[in-house]
């Protein structure tokens, strides 16, 4: 779950890059984001992998960490930890 700034287009562009890191990772199966219905709903992302080891590898990857750091500098903070 992420808390984006008030610029939904910039957040969408960043999120595309975040999801691209998952798509390039071994074992990637699918990803989806929550329906956007205004500021009252959190923006959530679900990413699925073939097994927990491949998911953990992506969660711990330097590439993903870099994208999360870039998002944080733009104000796209996470409001929940990684859930499995």
Image (tube, rainbow, N blue to C red):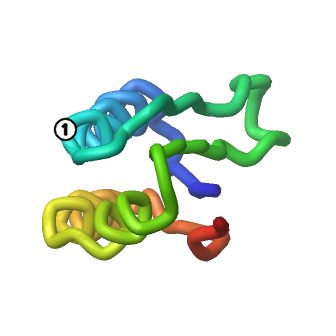
Q: Is the C terminus in the top left, top right, bottom left or bottom right quadrant?
A: bottom right
The crowding category of the residue bearing disc 1, from other C-alpha atoms within 10 Å (few below 14, some 14 to 19, many at least 20), is few
Residue holding disc 1: 24
Give how far across and how far down residue 67 sits, in percent: 23, 58
Q: Residue at x 73, y 47 (%)?
A: 42
Q: Please, is residue 15 above or below residue 36 in the view?
A: below
Q: Quadrant of residue 81?
A: bottom right
Q: Position of residue 55 (x, y in %)?
A: 42, 60
Q: Is residue 70 left or right of residue 16?
A: left
Instruction: Name the secondary structure under disc 1.
Output: loop
Q: Is residue 70 left or right of residue 18?
A: left
Q: Quadrant of residue 69?
A: bottom left
Does residue 64 appear to the left or right of 48 in the view shown?
Answer: left
Q: Quadrant of the N terminus?
A: bottom right
Q: Position of residue 5 (x, y in %)?
A: 50, 50
Residue 31 appears at what percent x and percent y?
A: 50, 32
* Residue in view at x 31 percent, y 75 percent: 60
Residue 69 lies, with reference to residue 54, above or below; the image says below
Q: Residue at x 32, y 58 (%)?
A: 71
Q: Along the line of sight, which residue is nearer the eye, 34 or 76?
A: 34
The one nearer the camera, 80 or 84, is 84
């Amino acid at each position: 779950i992420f808390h984006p700034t008030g610029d939904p287009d910039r957040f969408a562009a960043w999120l595309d890059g975040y999801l691209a890191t998952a798509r390039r990772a071994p074992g990637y199966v699918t990803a989806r984001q929550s329906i956007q219905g205004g500021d009252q709903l959190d923006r959530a992302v679900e990413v699925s992998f073939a097994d927990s080891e491949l998911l953990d590898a992506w969660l711990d990857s330097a590439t993903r960490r870099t994208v999360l750091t870039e998002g944080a500098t733009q104000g796209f903070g996470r409001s929940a930890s990684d859930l499995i």
